[in-house]
Amino acid sequence: NAGVMQNPRHLVRRRGQEARLRCSPMKGHSHVYWYRQLPEEGLKFMVYLQKENIIDESGMPKERFSAEFPKEGPSILRIQQVVRGDSAAYFCASSPPTFTGELFFGEGSRLTVL
Amino acid sequence: AQSVTQLGSHVSVSEGALVLLRCNYSSSVPPYLFWYVQYPNQGLQLLLKYTSAATLVKGINGFEAEFKKSETSFHLTKPSAHMSDAAEYFCAVSDRNAGNMLTFGGGTRLMVKP
């Protein structure tokens, strides 16, 4: 399967714990995008990364959220001290370095905060 | 800045009836436009895309969309709805200035009645 891989698919955390979501892009793709989908809402852009570089984080909440895409390994979206409002589906997408105007999405990680 | 507006968060049609999902966009540069479909608890799948070639774009599952610059619209249609078309549909816009980043509309949930 050469698609975008996200794990875990489902994650349950208690308030105050940390959540780590992982994304492995498609083979040959060096750009990763994270989106958040709140219940009954559309997808909101969070952050756009290249290897070892954050290109655009204009959609990231100012506190508790961080993202990285290291030289080796998957991209990670980290949420510290989770609150109930963080419960959502987090989608990762990838694209090749050249502009194609298209993103390829993973199946999402669904975070539930108790 | 780009934006997408999808009129009607819920659309209900009878099986065999015409499907029309509306999308209007705002972009300061010639846009690339997309329709994605999301089935329950799954990721987003590309239905079709407009990238400045033919204004009438055909996609998978019998869907098509027409780019109308004068109306800044990119409405999605299908002549005859099938029960399996029931899903959430998202319109999105991107441009070269934003890499491959997509801006999504709020989504339209399509329900198909037998």
Image (cartoon, coloured by chain):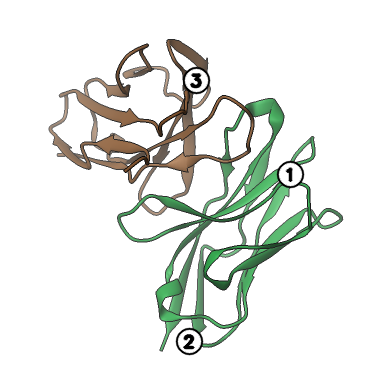
* Residue that carries the numbered disc 2 in the rendered image: B15
> How far across and how far down the image is residue A43, in percent?
47, 44
Do the dots labelled 2 and 1 sit on one chain?
yes
Numbered badge on residue B106 = none
Q: Secondary structure at mark 1?
A: strand
Residue B79, placed above or below residue B52? below
Packing grade of label 2 (10 A; few <14, some 14-19, many >=20) is some
* Residue that carries the numbered disc 1 in the rendered image: B26
Residue A96, placed above or below residue B47? above
> How far is mark 3 from mark 1, CA to CA?
22 Å
The picture's colour for chain B is green
> Which residue is at a point 48% across and 14% down the rendered structure image?
A54
Chain letter of the brown region? A
> Which residue is at a point 48% across and 70% down the rendered structure image?
B110
Packing grade of label 1 (10 A; few <14, some 14-19, many >=20) is some
Amino acid on which the number 2 mark rests in the picture: Glu
Amino acid on which the number 1 mark rests in the picture: Ser
**Do tag 3 and tag 1 residues touch (Cβ < 8 Å)?**
no
> Which residue is at a point 68% across and 37% down the rendered structure image?
B2
Please identify the quadrant where the N terminus of chain B is shown: top right
> How far across and how far down the image is residue B67, in percent?
76, 57
> How far is mark 2 from mark 1, CA to CA?
32 Å
What is the chain letter for disc 3?
A
> Which residue is at a point 49% across and 27% down the rendered structure image?
A59
* Residue in front for this viewpoint, B61 or A88: B61
* Residue that carries the numbered disc 3 in the rendered image: A57
Residue A81, placed above or below residue B79? above
* Residue in front for this viewpoint, A47 or B7: A47
